[in-house]
């Protein structure tokens, strides 16, 4: 279950995975071109003939480029990552930080 999702109180979407944790569409991650930029994605034939971005004609702009996902392996990395979001001006709910700290403490006791 996600620690927090995009909402009026959160600019981050962070959740546990099988290999650690992931910050989905992370605003700290470098933006890259997407199928919305060029109108094509060779991995998905269904998206072959979409028109390129109307604003930039496929050159890349804030409307069509997306941020990638940041992957982390430890609770400590997640907490540091969330601190970076706060420093960057992003909203991070306190309940997400508290839940991560509780899980970290619980896992430390079991190792």
Image (spheres, helix red, strand yellow):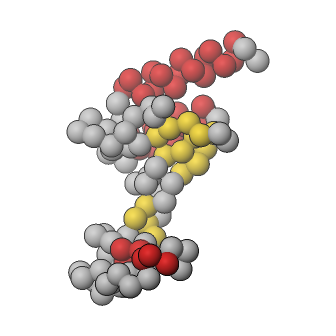
Quarter of the image for residue 95 reads top left
The furthest residue to the top: 109
One can see residue 51 in this view: yes
- Residue farthest to the front? 46
Specify whether 107 is left or right of 45. right
Q: Which residue is drawn at 40% across and 65% down?
A: 66
- Which quarter of the figure has residue 105? top right
Residue at x 37%, y 70% (from the top left corner): 65
Figure quadrant of the C terminus: top right
Nearer to us in this view, 28 or 46? 46
User: In the rendering, at what x and y percent does residue 106 appear?
Assistant: 62, 15
Asked whether, in this view, residue 53 is left or right of residue 48, the answer is left
| Relative vertical location of residue 46 with respect to residue 81 in this rendering, above or below | below
Q: In this view, does 3 lie above or below 36?
A: above
Determine the residue positioned at 48% across, 31% down.
1
Residue that lies at the very extreme toward the right in this rendered image: 111
Residue 8 percent across, percent down from the top left: 23, 39
In the rendering, at what x and y percent does residue 62 appear?
30, 69
Please name the residue shown 36% across and 74% down the image: 36
The percent coordinates of residue 22 (x first, y second) are: 54, 45
Q: Quadrant of residue 76?
A: top right
In depth, the one of 82 and 55 nearer the eye is 55
From this view, report whether residue 20 is shown above or below residue 33.
above
Total labels drawn: 0
- Residue 80 can be seen in this image: no
């Amino acid at each position: 279950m996600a620690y927090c999702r995009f909402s009026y109180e959160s600019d981050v979407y962070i959740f546990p995975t099988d290999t650690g944790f992931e910050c989905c569409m992370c605003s700290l991650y470098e933006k890259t071109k997407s199928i919305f930029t060029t109108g094509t994605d060779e991995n998905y034939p269904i998206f072959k003939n979409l028109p390129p971005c109307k604003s930039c004609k496929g050159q890349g702009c804030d409307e069509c480029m997306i941020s990638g996902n940041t992957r982390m392996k430890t609770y400590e990395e997640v907490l540091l990552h969330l601190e970076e979001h706060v420093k960057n001006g992003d909203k991070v709910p306190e309940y997400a930080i508290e839940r991560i700290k509780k899980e970290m403490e619980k896992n430390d006791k079991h190792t």
